[in-house]
Image: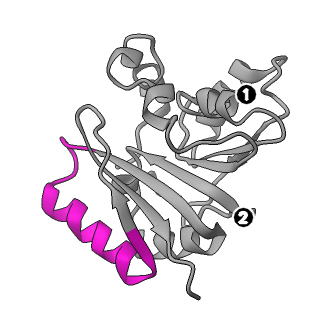
Amino acid sequence: MEKNSRICPLEKAGMLDNSLRKLVQNPARILKPYISKGMTVLDLGCGPGYFSVEIAKMLADPGKLIAADLQEGMLEKLNLKIRGTNLEHMIRLHKCEADKTGVTDMVDFILAFWMIHEVPDQDKLFIELKSILKPGGKIFIIEPRFHVSKKSFDEMINKFENIGFEMIERPKVFFSRTVLLAKINAE
């Protein structure tokens, strides 16, 4: 399989998961308005689990988090982080396939932090995400300003709206373009 040069390599995982990042991109502060106890959440492109651990803490039991990534090495870093903790039973590690997530669980909320721009066939991904999102479920997309232009971000939002989502808000996240979308129930 050809290596996707768009994907953040495992060697840079430390940049994604460090204490300095919490000063500008604090997971609890960013996600608190959207995560409730008992939800089922998909952290898509979870990397080494920077957001995954905080999401699981917010969900509490019986909440579930599916931490999905294309790279086995990223999932292993998260596995080492949660092994032996009370979060281990709440977080399910899931290795995505090259052309689809392969997640089949129905979820209440999807986080896609700085990863949509890495996906070659976004249209296919968006339809797959819609199929696993419960009616009224939400997807929070955060993309880096330095990789994603305003024009391409707005085009992505239009694609979601065309397949049955509505924009709820555009939360502020440091150095990012953001959108919170909800799946429209009428289907």
Q: Amino acid at mark 1?
A: Asn
Residue 145 vs residue 94: left or right? left
Magenta residues span 144-166
Say if residue 139 shows up in the picture: yes
Q: Position of residue 60 (x, y in %)?
A: 76, 32
Q: Is residue 163 magenta?
A: yes
Instruction: Using the image as rendered, state which of residue 104 and residue 62 is in the foreground.
Output: 62
- Please identify the quarter of the rendering in which residue 134 is found: bottom right
Say if residue 4 shows up in the picture: no
Q: Earlier in the sequence, mark 2 or mark 1?
A: 1
Q: Residues within 10 Å of mark 1 (few under 14, many from 20)?
A: some
Q: Residue at x 39, y 73 (%)?
A: 160
Disc 2: which residue: 106
Q: Please report contact status of discs 2 and 1: CB closer than 8 Å, yes or no.
A: no
Q: Secondary structure at mark 2?
A: loop
> Dividing the image into 4 quarters, which one contains the N terminus?
bottom right
Q: Position of residue 91 (x, y in %)?
A: 75, 37
Residue 79's mark?
A: 1
Instruction: Using the image as rendered, state which of residue 93 and residue 64 is in the foreground.
Output: 64
Q: Position of residue 122 (x, y in %)?
A: 40, 69
- In the rendered view, tell whether residue 24 sits above or below residue 62: above
Extreme-top residue of the structure: 19
- Name the mark nearer the viewer: 2 or 1: 2
- In the rendered view, tell whether residue 38 sits above or below residue 103: above
Q: Residue at x 41, y 17 (%)?
A: 22
Q: Residue at x 57, y 79 (%)?
A: 185
Q: Residues within 10 Å of mark 2 (few under 14, many from 20)?
A: some
Colour setting: one colour
Residue 156 vs residue 39: left or right? left
- Please identify the quarter of the rendering in which residue 11 is found: top left
Q: Amino acid at mark 2?
A: Met
